Image (spheres, rainbow, N blue to C red):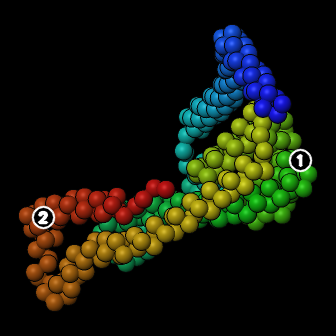
Amino acid sequence: MFGLDLNVIAIIALAAISAGAVTYGILFSRIEADKKAESRVNKVKTAETDRQKIKASRDRLAEMTKRRKSVQDSLKELERKQKEDNKKKSMTLQARIDQTGLGFTLSQFYMVSAGLGLATAVVLLISGAPLLLLLGVSFVVGAGLPRFFVNFMVKRRQKKFIEELPNALDVMVRSIKSGLPLNDAIRLIASEAKDPVRTEFRRVVEAQQMGLSVPEAIARIYLNIPLPEVNFFAIVIAIQAQAGGNLSEALNNLSRVLRDRRKMKAKVNALSMEAKASAVIIGALPFIVAFLVYLTSPAYMLILFTDPRGHLIMGASAIWMSIGILVMRNMINFDI
């Protein structure tokens, strides 16, 4: 009985397995078709998601390209306007005098030049100098010394402005982050900063009171301080006014760039100081040797001044010395 039950169970199991195998064989093609259909549906969904991601990425890229093009157009427009302004107001003597910040007029400059030339002529006349020497030295002193003073004062003022500008930008960044508008930050610099930054920002405030916009008023600083750093500042303000953006972050980056440029200039000056000293020694050596030879043997050196051939030699030497000094100057000067 037990054996019969086992046979029956085995037959039933084999029948079930056979029925399952037949059913799987019949439904296999349909199951595979459903799997392929599901796989294709998943691929389509994945492709749609990828297309959406690609489309979003393309949109972001197009927006970035559009913004970059807008910034480039703004830069080109600013450069064009700046070139036009520079053409309208060329670098005249009056412009250089205004850049000194001393406040004297062109007529006063000419009066001082004439006074210096006249005083030099009187001194030379009393000392019995020849007429040609008197005229030449008086002209050089009267025309050259005041211009040298003006150029010296302009460079000195520009140097002070560049040293103080990063600190002023830091104050503007902190003011803007604390919630003050740009106009109030500019007024704060105009009242609290050191000269000549304070003077230039006061002119910006006065220009705003006359009706100019902030970018236009700041761009006028370049007329009194024609330096690349001032141009950078004007461009940052103009771009922020046209395209928007985080002004405090832009000014903070500009302040860091200006400090890095100043550090680089100091490093370059330190590295080139040896070459500059060598150039000065080499340039002064012929004059020192000529003076020492004149002290020991005056007749040997006076031939250069009395003989026409000596005049020719001195002229050729002066030309070659000038060429050598110019070459050395270009070798040791670096633009940053």
Q: Secondary structure at mark 2?
A: helix
Please, is residue 328 above or below residue 49 in the view? Answer: below
Q: Secondary structure at mark 1?
A: loop
Residue bearing the label numbered 1: 181
Which residue is depicted at the point 31% across and 59% down?
326
Q: Amino acid at mark 2?
A: Ile
- Nearer to me, 14 or 99: 14
Q: Position of residue 243 (x, y in %)?
A: 74, 33
Q: Position of residue 222 (x, y in %)?
A: 64, 46
Which residue is depicted at the point 82% across and 34% down?
2
Q: Is residue 298 left or right of residue 26?
A: left
Label 1 vs label 2, nearer the camera = 1
Find the distance from the CA under tag 1 to the CA under tag 2.
Answer: 68 Å
Q: Which mark is residue 313?
A: 2
Q: Position of residue 122 (x, y in %)?
A: 45, 71
Task: Report which quarter residue 256 is drawn in.
Answer: bottom right
Which residue is depicted at the point 25% across and 77% down?
285
* Residue 156 seen in the figure: yes
Please, is residue 98 above or below residue 288 in the view? Answer: above
- Nearer to me, 228 or 116: 228
- Nearer to me, 80 or 314: 80
Mark 1 near mark 2, Cβ–Cβ under 8 Å? no
Tag count: 2
- Nearer to me, 8 or 224: 8
* Residue 196 seen in the figure: no
